[in-house]
Amino acid sequence: MSFKPANHIQDLQYFGEFGGVNPSISDASTYTFLSAKTMFDTFEGNADGCYLYSRHTSPSNLYLGEALAAMEGTETANVTASGMGAITAVLMQICNAGNHVISSRTIYGGTYAFLKNFTPKFNIGTSFVDITKPKLVEAAITKNTKVIFCESVSNPLLEIADLKALSAIAKRHNIKLVVDNTFSPLSISPVKLGADVVIHSLTKFINGASDTVGGVVCGTQEFIDDLRNVNDGASMLLGATMDSLRAASVLKNLRTLHIRMQQHSKNALYLAKKFESDGLKTVYPGLESHPSHELFKSQMNEEYGFGGMLTIDVGSIDLANDLMEMMQENNLGYLAVSLGFYKTLFSAPGTSTSSEIPEEEQIQMGLTNGLIRFSIGLDADIERTYNKMRDCMIALGILKNKPVTTNI
């Protein structure tokens, strides 16, 4: 039987303190104890079910973590104040001074900057490789390598990681495979493909309202306990804690994720096919022209589609900026970073979300300055959206004026 992540979320049942259909929010930073011994035991991690201080955890955060662990098929999860709070804590927990990380060369700019510029302060080195070529990944392993880090679907080039192959490599060398699954929640279940740790920026599709910043680490009970340890846990000591009110808000939105992802994917596939038919250089995993189309199909949970992210290349940064400004003026979305909103969001990643990557490295990985990254929204009439986008492209000379076809 195939993995059904939305079912696992739906099967969780929570009641509020007074019987509410939503769990009560733990609006407290600290918790009282009836005995001093219980407080001591809690500090030592020996009093299961007792709460100490909300930087450690809270009931609201545990509810959300349990739901996200159910979605990813892990034993448990720890929520954080941001996606970067999750990524940095995981890498700092696994690695010590002198250790080595292998990372995909195409990753979110903040993750790249952390690995390229920040971790060397602690004598942690990183090799950036083409993650689509497992042989290159294995060749980069040294005796000090502790982590293979990748994104299921890379930001912003939408490269697809072969998680089964990477997992086999990681297990052969006794290292951890850590996967950022932000671009493909529900569509891909990395743990079922062999990942050890799964990370999300909850800010994006999972929350879906562009009103909250958050992150999560999904993994084994042992690893999450290590992250929360009061003596040497990276999540506990670095302090990237999610607020209980925000955790409760994300949990409510998580319950509609399956519906939203289906619509994001449906709309993105429609636009990708249209753009490609128009002759635009279009990248989307759902297109047969995508070099990893079949790989994605072999890894996906089919009912959630190929995701809501696509890119087009219009040839220059000036044209990209003009098009994005015109689309915003015509209410087709927002010229904004991030993703997963109900409205379409678009940006030129070379000068925004990937600007931390030096220009020469952007060129090597194929990130051109005319690339536009789209997070496709939940439009009810996607044909209307396409026609209006096409009109903008015609006005700017990106497309020639030709009869509109409504059937693909």
Image (cartoon, rainbow, N blue to C red):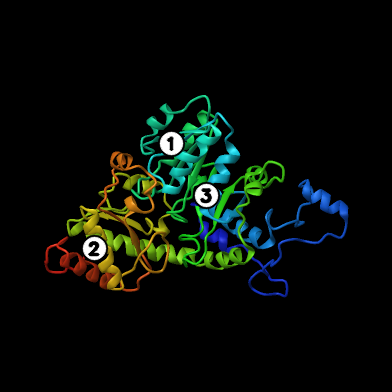
Disc 3 and disc 2: Cα gap in Å?
35 Å
**Label 3 or label 1, whichever comes before in sequence order:** 1
Q: Which mark is residue 199?
A: 3
Residue 316 placed where, x, y %? 21, 53
**What's the amino acid at mark 1?**
Ala
**Which of these two is toward me, 228 or 73?**
228
Left or right, residue 361 beside residue 399: right
> What residue is disc 1 on?
165
Left or right, residue 43 beside residue 143: right
The residue shown at (46%, 61%) is 205
**What's the amino acid at mark 2?**
Asp
Residue 71 placed where, x, y %? 54, 56
**Which of these two is toward me, 388 or 290?**
388
Left or right, residue 398 beside residue 105: left
**Which of these two is toward me, 308 or 86?**
86
Helix or strand or loop: what does disc 1 sit on?
helix
**Label 1 or label 2, whichever comes before in sequence order:** 1
Residue 310 placed where, x, y %? 32, 56
